[in-house]
Image (cartoon, grey):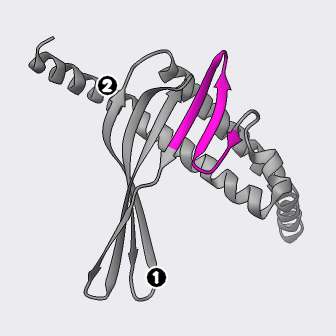
Amino acid sequence: MTPEEIRAEVERRKDRARDLKIRETLWDLQKSFRSYKHWLRDDPQFAKRIVYPGVELSDDEARFSLGQTAYKLVYCKGKASSKDYGGTECTTTRSTLTLKLDDDSVFEFEVVETAEYFRDFPAFNERVGEISRFTEGPWVTEIAEFVQNVNAHVQSAWKERNAPREAREAEELRNRFGL
């Protein structure tokens, strides 16, 4: 392939990945895994119900299997840079999120996380950035289905956790409205 053909193919793949919203899907999955770590620390009993079966978490990695394929989602936090804008401090961290299948990297992109510290409150922002790797394959649909299953599992755990409170609220409403 000529350099022009290579660049054109890379742009086609990036467009395809953007159309499929792979960055957003993987970033949502990473945020779910990050919340698992908080639950494991703060409420281990609930964490047992909320953590999707088969997911193994370590510092900046999550491992899971789909069929015969071993997946690893790796979050590599970059160095933070800070600037002061007349009393408002802004910290920006550029990180990468990589999806590996059997130790082969198939997708990678940048994530930019910003924290602005105003006088009265902080404001946080995250955005998915540049795609730096994309090897298409069956994993694209497998990971999308996996994320749906993870989200359904989490919703089910929260519904179970909130059921007693919702029952009390329904009973109070029934009593107040004479039903």
- Identified at 37% across, 70% down, the residue is 91
Name the residue carrying label 1. 121
Q: Amino acid at mark 1?
A: Phe
The extreme top residue here reads 1
Q: Is residue 13 above or below residue 130?
A: above
**Location of the C terminus (image quadrant):** bottom right
- In the rendered structure, which segment of residues is drawn in magenta? 56-74
Q: Nearer the viewer, residue 151 or 44?
A: 44
Marking on residue 166: none
Q: Residue at x 40, y 62 (%)?
A: 125
Q: Does the magenta stretch mainly form a helix, a strand or a loop?
A: strand
Which element carries disc 2, helix, strand or loop?
helix
Disc 2 residue type (three-letter): Arg
Circle 1 — which element? loop
Give residue 68's position: percent from left, percent from top: 66, 15
| Nearest to N terminus: mark 2 or mark 1 | 2
> In the figure, residue 2 lies in which quadrant?
top left
Residue 155, given in percent of the width and then of the height, sits at: 71, 45
Q: CA distance from mark 2 to mark 1?
A: 39 Å
